[in-house]
Image (cartoon, rainbow, N blue to C red):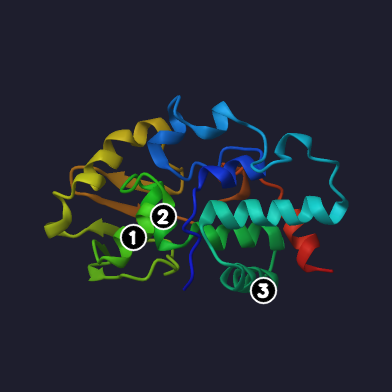
Amino acid sequence: MARYTGPVCRLCRRESMKLYLKGDRCFSDKCAYERRSYAPGQHGQRRGKLSDYGIQLREKQKIKRIYGLQEKQFKSYFKEADRQKGVTGTNFLILLERRLDNTVFRLGFANSRSQARQLVRHGHFLVNGRKVNIPSYLLRPGDVIAVREKSRQVGVINEALEALPRRGLMPWLELDKDKYQGVFRTLPTREEIPMPVQEHLVVEFYSK
């Protein structure tokens, strides 16, 4: 699947907020958004007022870039959320949070979702004792995510664990740092997902 491989700091500047795509760098004074908080490009500092469609589009792009998805996959999650009972926008965010790469990041085994995706693809993690190398694997309550025995000396994993207190652990997850494993305890509520996004705008965008 194609992935965006350009400078990710431009994405934060384009969405006018920190998307935390570069891990620890986003918390330092090297953060590009802190230095240039306007949109990239020649006319970045002269952005006009957005239309209703433009506002909805920007919100969709923001969520898509936070989770590192392409349009086709992103839309398939929305369709699945729309089929489920309950609030479509909330269901949508819960589906994204259930992804294995996102959970690896949330547990502190990686500094960013892109790094977590790469670690998962390289087979560093077990789910319920079985190796899973599919980043989009959807976890269920009670699933145990563990770093493989051979992978516990990987530098980036240990560095990320040391930096976890800066981000904090989500309330629907449980972590045992000594055993290099965590538990997906329960499905999160919307209030527990610390995402500064307005998911209802995505629902409106796809409902046209």
User: Which mark lies nearer to you, 3 or 1?
Assistant: 1
Q: Amino acid at mark 1?
A: Gln
In contact (CB < 8 Å): disc 3 and disc 1: no
Q: How many C-alpha atoms fall within 10 Å of the one at disc 3: few (<14), some, or many (≥20)?
A: few
Which of the 4 quarters of the picture holds residue 30? top left
Q: Earlier in the sequence, mark 2 or mark 3?
A: 3
The tag earlier along the polypeptide, 3 or 1, is: 3
Which of 169/115 is in front? 115
**Could you give the CA–CA distance between mark 2 and mark 3, rounded to whole angstroms?**
24 Å
Q: Which residue is mark 3?
A: 79
Q: Position of residue 117 (x, y in %)?
A: 38, 60
According to the picture, the residue beneath numbered tag 2 turns out to be 114
Provide residue 27's location: percent of width, then percent of height: 44, 30
Q: Secondary structure at mark 2?
A: helix
Badge 1: residue crowd in 10 Å (few <14, some 14–19, many ≥20): some
Q: Which mark is residue 118?
A: 1
Give amino acid for label 3: Lys
Marks 2/1 in contact by CB < 8 Å: the verdict is yes
